[in-house]
Image (cartoon, rainbow, N blue to C red):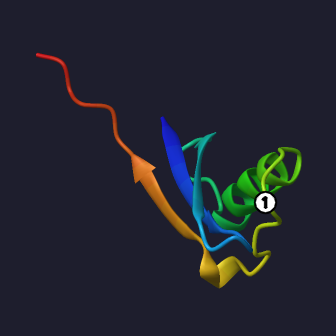
Amino acid sequence: MFWMVALLAQDGLQYVYRVYAPDDALPADLFWAAFHCHDDGPHPRASDRFDAAEIWRHRQPQQI
């Protein structure tokens, strides 16, 4: 199970990060995990505004 978190950056691009977390993970925890991952990379600074991020859960397709 993982979550996808999209962050807006100063260069006008949106960077999307995969965050592995349980179903009951708090959105703020998901945001900060992605933000710190972005901050450690070579990309322009991301917005630290929580409400500017998009967060959604990725569900694995069911196998038959």
Query: Is 3 positioned to the left or the right of 49 in the image?
Result: left
Looking at the image, residue 15 sits to the left or right of residue 46; the answer is left
In this orientation, which residue lies closer to the viewer: 38 or 57? 38
Residue 59 at x, y = what percent? Answer: 34, 40
What percent of the width, then of the height, locates residue 10? 74, 74
Q: What residue occupies the far front of the structure in this picture?
A: 11
Q: Quadrant of residue 60?
A: top left
Quadrant of the image containing the C terminus: top left
- Image position, residue 30 (x, y; %): 67, 56
Q: Residue furthest toward the top?
A: 64
Q: Quadrant of residue 39?
A: bottom right
| Horizontal side of residue 63 vs 45, given as left or right | left
In front: 12, or 28? 12
Q: Amino acid at mark 1?
A: Trp
Q: How many marks?
A: 1
Q: Please name the residue shown 76% across and 67% down the image.
A: 46
Task: Mark 1: give few (<14), some (14-19) or many (20+) Cα within 10 Å.
Answer: some
Q: Along the horizontal axis of the image, is 40 left or right of 19?
A: right
* Nearest to the observer: residue 27 or residue 35: 35
Residue at 52% x, 63% y is 55
Place of residue 13 in the rendered image (x, y in percent of width and height, measured from the top left):
59, 66
Name the residue furthest left: 64
Instruction: Look at the picture and state if 49 lies above or below 62.
Output: below
Q: Residue at x 18, y 18 (%)?
A: 63
Query: Which type of secondary structure does the marked residue at label 1 adopt?
Result: helix
6 versus 24 height, above or below: below
Q: Which residue is mark 1?
A: 32
Which residue: 20% across, 27% down?
Answer: 62
